[in-house]
């Protein structure tokens, strides 16, 4: 594991410990089971979709917004622009995120029929239940951070509560592990497999990773290009390489009209064939 992921994993473990002191697993599980269902993830028959991301900060780009901004208006703009889902950062120390952001986004997105996804460094099924209780319809699971047993436990928790999972990979070994784990499962969860092209040491984007790993993409699951997609041209390239979705954050957070940019990206990608 990289130094950055190790730092995030330790921080996440501490957050779980504190959260369990406030509310037991069984009590949280009851609340999660009683929560109103999230809109399901629906992928367009046009062949390409975007998971739009809301985050106030990133370690690579620095500040991307402020809690006093009309951030819920940006979330609504994502839905109007055609996002299939909205990723919401809930990590507090490096991304200025919170479960309140996830809860607010899920409420705003529900009338549009668009699910929110919790993006965080999850290490415990408890955090999947937190996401469901906050209204999320999906969660991110980072393969590189976790043992096989922990990955399976997170997948099981998501399946139990009807959440889709974005399994994040960084290299060929991660993709091989994802395929092995998913082929061995007998649950009906919805899983996307993502390739993150950000270098974990420098935090810089290495866009060539998308093309290098394209031949290894598991065809049985929709694959997501994460990081490094900022323009309609980028999205067209991802579609040609065989990616079914792109997760786009920084470009949309920096746009004065994210709905228009998102619509342009989707239109461009949907004009090409893989």
Image (tube, grey):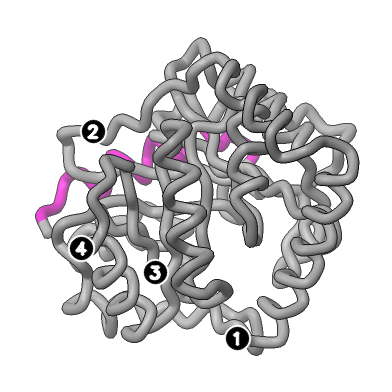
- Quadrant location of the N terminus? bottom right
Q: Which residue matches tag 1?
A: 1
Q: In x, y percent, where is residue 38?
A: 49, 22
Distance between the alpha carbons at the discs numbered 1 and 2: 35 Å
Sequence-wise, which precedes: disc 3 or disc 1? Answer: 1
Residue 55 locus on image (x, y percent): 69, 48
Of labels 1 and 2, the one closer to you: 1
Mark with earlier residue (2, 4): 2
Name the residue nearer the viewer: 255 or 189: 189
Q: Is residue 196 visible?
A: no
**Residue indicated by mark 2:** 44
Secondary structure mostly seen in the magenta stretch? helix
| For discs 3 and 4, the disc positioned in front in the rendered view | 4
**Of marks 2 and 4, the one in the foreground:** 4
N-term-proximal mark, 1 vs 4: 1
> Sequence-wise, which precedes: disc 3 or disc 2?
2
User: Where is residue 91 drawn, in percent x and y?
Assistant: 75, 54
Image-based side of 97 in relation to 133, left or right? right
Instruction: Find residue 183 and name its label.
Output: 4
Residue contact at pointers 3 and 2, CB within 8 angstroms? no
The residue where tag 3 is placed is 195
Q: What are the residue bounds of the magenta stretch?
A: 256-273
Q: CA gap, disc 3 to disc 2?
A: 20 Å
| Mark 1: secondary structure | loop
| Label 2 to label 4: alpha-carbon separation | 25 Å
């Amino acid at each position: 594991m990289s130094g950055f992921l190790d730092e995030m994993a330790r921080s996440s473990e501490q957050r779980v410990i504190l959260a369990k002191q406030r509310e037991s697993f069984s009590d949280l599980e009851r609340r999660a089971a009683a929560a109103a269902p999230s809109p399901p993830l629906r992928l367009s028959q046009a062949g390409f979709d975007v998971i739009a991301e809301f985050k106030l900060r990133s370690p690579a780009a620095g500040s991307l917004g402020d809690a006093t901004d009309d951030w819920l208006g940006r979330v609504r703009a994502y839905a109007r622009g055609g996002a299939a889902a909205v990723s919401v950062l809930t990590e507090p120390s490096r991304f200025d995120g919170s479960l309140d952001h996830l809860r607010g986004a899920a409420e705003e997105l529900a009338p549009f029929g668009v699910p929110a996804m919790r993006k965080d460094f999850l290490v415990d099924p408890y955090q999947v239940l937190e996401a469901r209780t906050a209204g999320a319809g999906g969660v991110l699971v980072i393969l590189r951070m976790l043992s096989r047993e922990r990955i399976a436990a997170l997948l099981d928790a998501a399946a139990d509560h009807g959440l889709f999972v974005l399994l994040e990979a960084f290299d060929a070994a991660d993709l091989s592990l994802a395929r092995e784990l998913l082929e061995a499962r007998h649950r009906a969860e919805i899983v996307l497999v993502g390739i993150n092209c950000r270098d974990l040491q420098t935090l810089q984007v290495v866009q060539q990773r998308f093309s290098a790993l394209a031949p290894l993409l598991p065809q049985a699951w929709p694959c997501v290009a994460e990081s490094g997609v900022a323009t309609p041209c980028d999205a067209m390239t991802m579609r040609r390489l065989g990616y079914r979705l792109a997760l786009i954050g920084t470009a949309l957070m920096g746009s004065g009209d994210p709905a228009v940019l998102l619509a342009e990206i989707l239109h461009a990608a949907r004009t090409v064939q893989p």
